[in-house]
Amino acid sequence: MKLILKKSVENLGEAGEVIQVKPGFGRNYLIPQGLAYIATQANIQRLEQEQAQSEERSKRDFLEASRRASQLEAISPVIFHARAGDDGKLFGSVTSADIADRINESSVDFELNRREILLDDPIKMLGVWEISLNLHGEVRASIEVHVERE
């Protein structure tokens, strides 16, 4: 029995893959669990159309992320003024949400989500920091964040 997997199944295949299984396994497990559907000619054509649309969508997302990365690198550095002690330690911190808010206030034509900013711990010292941004699975950008004394 030929089936098309809706979801990835361990030791069987990935989502969207056409597989050959015994009829009982397909009828009694895969189809009732919603893991697969029968591979008729119409379903195979629909799968090919969905894959083509998915490739087009991912290509469009990649190009959009690349455009966003070039805009972000153009506005670098992002400058913060904060109160700090004599040793350079901040009274507070600069978080990824603060960085996202400052970038969104600038002249970019998109909304940057704080989850796209790869900052392990908040910035708690004066100085210049290189911050990475994950805009897409394959697109990363980096910006400079300057934290200066108020």
Image (cartoon, rainbow, N blue to C red):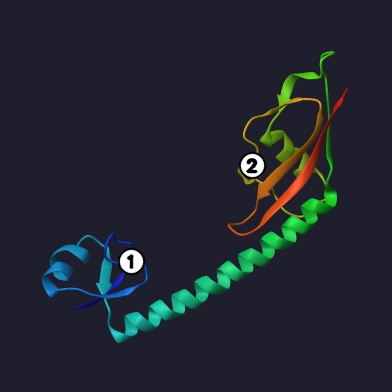
Q: Secondary structure at mark 2?
A: strand
Within 10 angstroms of label 1, few (less than 14), some, or many (20 or more) residues? some
Q: Nearer the viewer, mark 1 or mark 2?
A: 2
Q: Looking at this view, is 136 or 110 the one in front? A: 136
Q: Which residue is painted at 13% across and 65% down in the image?
A: 28
Q: Looking at this view, is 136 or 41 the one in front? A: 136
- Res 121 quadrant in image: top right
Left or right for 62, reference 126:
left
Left or right for 12, reference 132:
left
| Residue placed under numbered mark 2 in the picture | 118
Residue 99 in sight in this render: yes
Whether pointer 1 and pointer 2 mark residues with C-beta atoms closer than 8 Å, the reply is no
* 33 versus 148 height, above or below: below
Q: Residue furthest top?
A: 86
| Residue placed under numbered mark 1 in the picture | 6
* Residue 32 % position (x, y): 19, 63
